[in-house]
Amino acid sequence: MSIEVKDVMGLVAIAVLENASFADIVATMKRYAVGAVTVVDADRRPVGVVSENDLLLKEADPVRHSMSIFESRRRRRDHDKAAGATAVQLMTSPAITVTPGTAVRDAAKLMHTQRIKQLPVIDPVTGRIVGTLHQRDVLRVFTRPAAR
């Protein structure tokens, strides 16, 4: 029997709406002591994620007045994020999600390959966010009794 996301996930999802301001996102991350927030649409469906790394671009990559035609797509996206003021402009999208029935092993592989520390958990029918799976939740599997 494999352990599923629903067995270890957090039932609280820290999320902001697409029009949340930079300051609101920072305040939300600080208030809940998280390194990322899920960006949801009006129907509570994840559309992206804003991480601390996305926010750091404001300071690390000040917006320039001209762009080079030789810049990579990623570099242009970073410049756009650095200029962003709302969640929809700052987020990385699409949101990489799992469902409560996803095997923890598969979620762990996804986190590792995508280099992400948390995953929004969505209802498989409605697509709405129902919780969050953090790396520490996955690691909790190793502290469970061997019989489980």
Image (tube, rainbow, N blue to C red):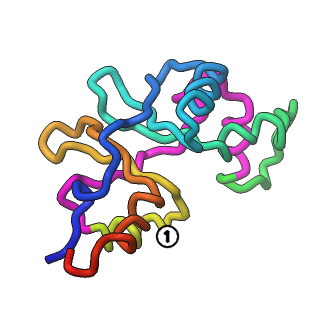
> Residue at the location (19% across, 43% down)?
123
Question: Would you say residue 80 sits in the magenta stretch?
Answer: yes
Percent coordinates x, y for residue 51 in the rendering: 59, 43
Quarter of the rendering containing residue 50: top right
> Residue at the location (67% across, 28% down)?
84
Q: Amino acid at mark 1?
A: His
Labels in figure, total: 1
Point out the image quarter for the C terminus. Answer: bottom left
> Residue at the location (32% across, 73% down)?
105
Q: Residues within 10 Å of mark 1 (few under 14, many from 20)?
A: few
Question: Would you say residue 46 sits in the magenta stretch?
Answer: no
> Residue at the location (59% across, 44% down)?
35
Determine the residue located farthest toward the bottom in the rendered image.
Answer: 146
Q: Nearer the viewer, residue 120 or 93?
A: 120
Percent coordinates x, y for residue 89 in the rendering: 58, 30
Question: Circle 1 sits on which residue?
Answer: 112
Quarter of the rendering containing residue 48: top left
Percent coordinates x, y for residue 3 in the rendering: 22, 69
Q: Nearer the viewer, residue 72 or 145?
A: 145
Location of residue 111 with respect to 133 vertically, above or below: below
Q: Which residues are magenta?
A: 75-103
Image position of 146 (left or right of 58): left
Percent coordinates x, y for residue 46 in the rendering: 36, 37
Point out the image quarter for the N terminus. Answer: bottom left
Q: Nearer the viewer, residue 69 or 47?
A: 47
Location of residue 86 with respect to 104 vertically, above or below: above
Q: Nearer the viewer, residue 12 or 70?
A: 12
